[in-house]
Image (cartoon, rainbow, N blue to C red):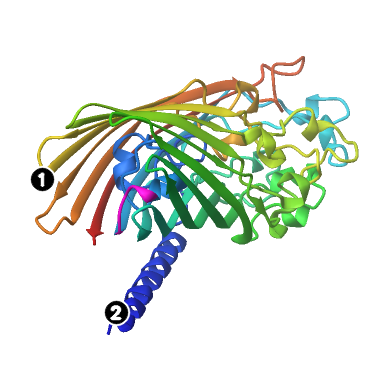
Amino acid sequence: MKQKKLIGLKNLLLGTAAVVAVGFLAAGDANATNGYFAHGYSVKNKGLAGAGVALPLDALAASVNPAGMTEVGQRLDLGVSLFSPRRSYDVKGTPTNPADVPGCSPTNPFACPFGLIPGKEDSDSEYFLIPSFGYNHMLTDHSAIGISVYGNGGMNTDYDAATFNYVNPQLPQDPTGVDLMQLFIAPTYAHKFAGKHSFGITPIIAVQFFEAKGTEAFGGFSSDPKSLSDNGHDTSFGYGARIGYLGQLTDKFSIGASYQTEIEMDEFDDYAGLFAEQGDFDIPQNFTVGFAFKPIPSVRFAFDWQRIYYSDIKSINNPLLPNLVTPISGAQLGDNKGAGFGWDDMDVFKFGLEWERSEQWTYRFGYSYSDDQPIPDSEVMFNILAPGVIEQHVTFGFTRTFANNNELDFAFMYAFKNDVKGDNPLDPPNDFGTGQTIELEMDQWEVSLGYSWVF
């Protein structure tokens, strides 16, 4: 009988994980907050603005720190978020007439200005459902195994305008945008030593989905124009790992640290003429360190510092200039030195406060801040496709605990509006025109709901 129950539980967990994975496929699209990394993954974690490397709260703790799985007990956590990013770009200035520029011709696009239609465009597709799943099983009082399923996204835009095709009226005047989603399946083992020091390891299986529309106008700059635009969704697979440490130094103070390796992904073959290194789009390494402090029994304070190394990934970090306008081997789109989004590394500071008002009600508050969003003002052109310019979030959440110890979770996040403005690098002020400026703008909100079974 016991074996049948274990088989039934195993089937339930596998089925639930499969449903969540399918949910990611259906929901797709966006979850951008810190660049394109989510501000948090579990509903409880989201209520603390993502802080939690030293404050594990549920079976999705492994998404932040695998070591935390020794502290959350045996449980199953399901969550879903309604996420709404509002993004836009605004072009000002009359585009330079290519006929006025000496040397500009269809056979020499590198000498031509690349102007955009003046005006403001808002991205459609503003609402996305993002599921999450976590299960943790205690092998002993000091060791645990579990699995978490969660995702990133956010390089999603959907403009009605043919943003880049204005330079060539013969190109399709169809909508412009990109769609990126990343799904992580993360099994975890964690063990606690001497009752105070936990270590955890999480092998990560990653799946990416990507589509680009309306980028045909860059064909003259691409090493593979047929693998540049409008090829539908392409898929890539990869693997990496996250390791973590959690130390309960005193009854009131704990520290945590985790490190995720760069996740090596297959190339997007259908977009080998867009991304550097023949369609390569690896997931950058990142680390998080922090602490949790419990000044009184009902209050806990958490602080995390996260650093994301976008600069390690050429398709994300390579600048637009001079790569795109230098007609030499290795500098075209898709080549190793081909233009990318020009993103810099990012530091994110997360502050969370948890107040256990009673046995039934726990409240959470959070604030996160980045010293600088990852897009320099020199890189606004390409980042019309991916305007991840958010720097600040505020969050609120609560948990209602029932008599059977199961939990209902809620979280709300608002990301303050932020913008980046710079010259159109392919049509700056020059002897033949006044040039153009491009302003990127984004704000976001998210509502999350979860339910937890505590065994």
- Per the image, the residue denoted by label 1 is 360
- Please, is residue 99 above or below residue 276 in the view? above
Picture coordinates of residue 394 (x, y %)?
Answer: 31, 29
Q: Which residue is drawn at the image coordinates 23% and 45% (left, top)?
A: 410
Label total for image: 2
Q: Nearer the viewer, residue 48 or 331?
A: 48
- 105 in magenta: no
Q: Residues within 10 Å of mark 2 (few under 14, many from 20)?
A: few
Q: Amino acid at mark 1?
A: Gln
Q: Amino acid at mark 2?
A: Lys
Residue that label 2 marks:
5
Q: How far across and how far down the image is residue 30, in percent?
A: 45, 47
Sequence order check, earlier mark of 2 and 1 = 2
Q: What SS does tag 1 mark?
A: loop
Which residues are drawn in magenta? 70-74
Q: Is residue 148 left or right of residue 374?
A: left
- Residue that appears at 44% across and 57% down: 149
